[in-house]
Image (tube, helix red, strand yellow):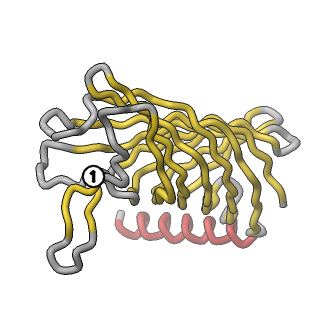
Amino acid sequence: MKRLIIILFLFSVAFAQDTLDDYRQHTTWGFVTGANILNYSLNLQSAVGAPDRAAPGIGAELGLFFDYHISEPWALRFIPSAGMEHIQLFKGSDDGHLFTFAMELGMAAEYTFNLRQSEVNICLGPYTHFVLASTLYGSNELTNPYSRTVAADPVTEQPSFAMGDLNAGLAFAIAYQTPSWWFLQLDVRYGVTDLLNADSHRLYVRPFKAVLSVGKRFL
């Protein structure tokens, strides 16, 4: 029995190697642009001066992607993008609009299968999000959490803001690609990093975002 398992294992490895040897690995690239919807999963009930709740807002983004095709169905994808995000924050009867201008870097494993004359691409992997600038307007009670100082480092005296400008998470994307290599794509991204700079484990702010976009692939 052990010999049979070893023989089958060696045969499968050899078959996979032959398949990869016959396949010409190559790189494709393209662009993607569309609208995003941002919201927060949060608990700020006991935080002073913090919003009571949040509502999603619509923004826009533009990105590139580079795919390294390892085999017929599998590829590795590198995804740099930039855009504007919008979320509405509430405190009592007061509300404000928070706009962030951000960049994202993502890596994903991509699986492709044929659907009639077209293709479906599925991607899953981590991403990192950087807030480059932010502004909040329309509120008399709230302040921009990316510039609101809540503490200072006792050694360097550098300010600590209410929310950090760096987070990471997991992204899932599915795209329908036509024979002309135009595609329609839906991304869902969930941040696992707590944006809130607080000592309490009960308080947190975690972003999640959906992006509906169109794009084009090139050789």
Dot 1: element: loop
Is 33 drawn above or below residue 23 in the view shown?
A: above
Q: Residue 5: which quarter of the image?
A: bottom left
**Can residue 177 be seen in the rendering of this structure?**
yes
Closest to the observer: 11 or 202?
202
Q: Residues within 10 Å of mark 1 (few under 14, many from 20)?
A: many
Estimate the x, y position of residue 213 in percent, counting from the top left: 67, 38
Q: Residue furthest bottom?
A: 155
The answer to which image quadrant residue 4 occupies is: bottom left
Q: Where is mark 1, residue-wise? A: 162
- Residue 200 in percent (x, y) is at 11, 49
Write the residue at 57% across / 45% down: 84
Where in the figure is residue 31, as x and y percent of width and height?
A: 74, 52
The residue depicted at 61 percent of the width and 66 percent of the height is 16
Left or right of 8? Residue 61 is right
Mark 1 is on which residue type?
A: Ala
Q: Residue furthest front?
A: 140
Q: Residue at coordinates 76% horizontally, 55% vertically from top-left?
A: 30
Query: Would you say 152 lies left or right of 2 here?
Result: left
**From what the image shows, is residue 61 above or below residue 118?**
below
Please provide percent x and percent y for residue 73.
66, 53
